[in-house]
Image (tube, rainbow, N blue to C red):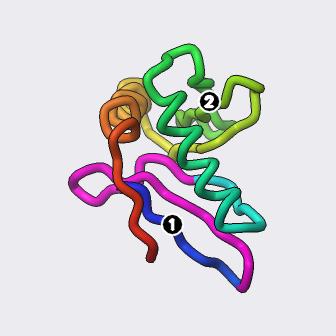
Amino acid sequence: MFELKNKEGASYHFTLKAKNGQVILSSEVYNSKAAAENGIASVQKNASDDGRYERKTAKDGRFFFNLKAGNGQVIGSSQMYSSESGMENGINSVKENAPGADTKEA
């Protein structure tokens, strides 16, 4: 499920949560609800395309990924993972959960 949150006035942010409630993807902060909803739609559209995932290693050796739209813009980022296999499991979870996920306002 996508959880859409209003932050400080007109700012919005969303997270994608797995069925167990764990956050698997977080968005940037958007300046309007409509822009955040467009971000959610973009995640749903791009989640199943493995080529849209940018796999990265942080300076401390942990792993994370970004999901990018067709224009190359980052539309969501993962948490940090201690292993590469954990990161791949996170990507697979986004692929599985995002396309048909409902949106709930928090």
**Which of the image's four quarters has the N terminus?**
bottom left
Real-space Cα separation, disc 2 to disc 1, in angstroms: 28 Å
Q: Farthest residue to the top: give it.
A: 51
Residue 106 position in % (x across, y down): 44, 77
Residue 26 position in % (x across, y down): 55, 53
* Residue assigned mark 2: 57
Which stretch did the figure color magenta?
A: 9-26
Q: Farthest residue to the bottom: give it.
A: 9
Residue 49 position in % (x across, y down): 49, 18
Residue drawn at (35%, 54%) of the image: 102
| Mark whose residue sits in front, 2 or 1 | 1
Residue drawn at (61%, 64%) of the image: 13
Residue type (three-letter) at the residue carrying disc 2: Thr
Q: Please tell me in which quadrant of the rendered image residue 86 appears.
A: top left
Tag 2 secondary structure: strand
User: Is residue 23 found inside the magenta-colored segment of the image?
Assistant: yes
**SS assignment for the magenta stretch, majority:** strand
Q: Are marks 2 and 1 in contact (CB under 8 Å)?
A: no
**Residue 80, disc:** none
* Residue assigned mark 1: 4
